[in-house]
Image: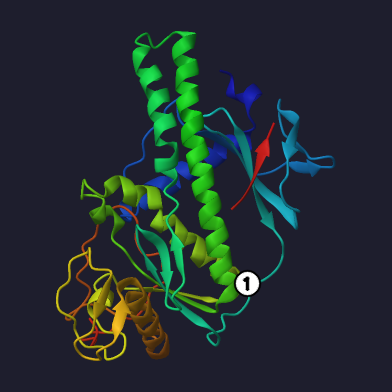
Amino acid sequence: MNGSKSVTLSALQSSVLNLSQAFINFFDGRALYPTFKKPQGKQSIQFPQNVKVLEHDQIKFPGNLGVVKAKIHRELVGIVKTVTVSKMPDCRYYASLLMDDGIARPETIEDGKAIGIDLGLLDFVVTSEGSKYQNPRHLKKHERNLKRKQKKLSRKKNKTTNKRRKAKLAVAKVHARIARVREDFRHKLSRKIVDENQIIVVENLAVKNMVKNHCLAKSISDAGWGMFCTMLKYKAEAFGKVYLEVGRFFPSSHLCSETLLSLPKMDLSVREFDCPHCGKRHDRDVNAAINIKNEGLRILALGTSVTALGGNVRPKQYGRKSTNVEAVALELGSPLSIRRMRVG
C-alpha cells in the first residue's frame, strides 16, 4: 500500500510516537513488551491535525477519507486536538476526540462528605454508609448465547471461508455487547458516587494475583474493579474532589470498626459476625468499608501513605498498579499496617 496516498504524514508520525511511549511503559515496568497488532483485533489510526467537526453530525478527515457521518452523543466544547479512529472486532467504528476546552483543573478541596468503598463479587460495591450495589454479572447473563456462537465458530475448520468469518463476527458482537453493558454500569455507578461525595477512599487490590485463583478468576475479571477505580479517579479529579487508595496490606476485614482491635480469623462464607470486643453485630463488608474510610481520612490528615512495617514491600510487577501515580512520602511503622462516539 502506498502510504503517501492512503494516510497523511502526521498520522504516520503519530504511530511512531505511540510506539515510543509503549517502549517507555515497558522499561518503566508499567506494561509488557510491545507486540504487533493482529488483523482480527482492534485497529486504530490517529489524526493529530486537520480534522473538523461539521454540522449535522459529520466529521471531516484529511486525505482520502473526506467527510464521514457520525453519531455524536454529547456536546463538543473546545478545540479539537487529536482524533483517533478505531475499528472494533465487531466491525464498529468509533472516533475518540481529544478536546482542549481551555478550562483549568479545579483546586482540590479536602472538606466535605467522605465515603469508603469495599469492592466484592457478591456485592460489587459496599459503602461505609451501608449501601450495597449488587454485582450484575454481565458475562453470566450472556454466557449461554456466547457458548452457542463459539460452538458454531469451532465447527468451521476452514479459516478462509465466508461462513467462518460470519461466525467469528457473531462471537465478536456478543463480546462487544458484554463490554458495553459492563462499561455502562461502571460509568453510571462511578458518576453517582462522585456526585454525592467529596472524599472517596478505596482499597488498592492486587487483581493480577487474585485471578490466579482458578475458582474465582472468571468472576473477578468480569467485575472489572481496576477500570471502575480508574473511572472514580478521573471523574473525582475533574471536579476537584479527593480520590485515595488504601494499601492492599491494610487489614480492613480483620479490624473492628468501633474499637480498631483485631478480629479472630473468619471464613469468607461468614458475612455477619458478633464482635468480641464491642459486642455489636457487624456486616463484614460494611465494617471493611468503614475501616477503609477511616484509614483514608487518617492518611489525608497526615499527608503520608500507609505501608507495611519497615518500608514498601510490594514487588515490581506488570499489571494494574495503583491509580495514584504521583510520588508520595512513605510512613514507616504505621499502627494500622476520554469522549467517544460512533462513526458511520
Q: Residues within 10 Å of mark 1 (few under 14, many from 20)?
A: few
Find the residue positioned furthest to the left.
Answer: 265
Q: Residue at x 53, y 45 (%)?
A: 181
| Amino acid type at image mark 1 | Arg
Find the residue positioned furthest to the right.
Answer: 55
Is 209 displayed left or right of 6 in the figure?
A: left
Is 18 displayed left or right of 332 in the figure?
A: right
Is 46 displayed left or right of 26 in the figure?
A: right
For label 1, the residue is 105
Q: Residue at x 50, y 36 (%)?
A: 176
Is 109 displayed left or right of 126 in the figure?
A: right
Q: Position of residue 261 (x, y in %)?
A: 21, 88
Q: Is residue 20 above or below residue 131?
A: above
Q: Position of residue 85 (x, y in %)?
A: 61, 37
Q: How many numbered badges does the structure rendering display? A: 1
Q: Is residue 171 above or below residue 228?
A: above
Question: Observer-nearest residue: 54 or 282?
Answer: 282
Q: Is residue 103 above or below residue 124?
A: below
Question: Observer-nearest residue: 185 or 130?
Answer: 130
Q: Position of residue 47 (x, y in %)?
A: 64, 40
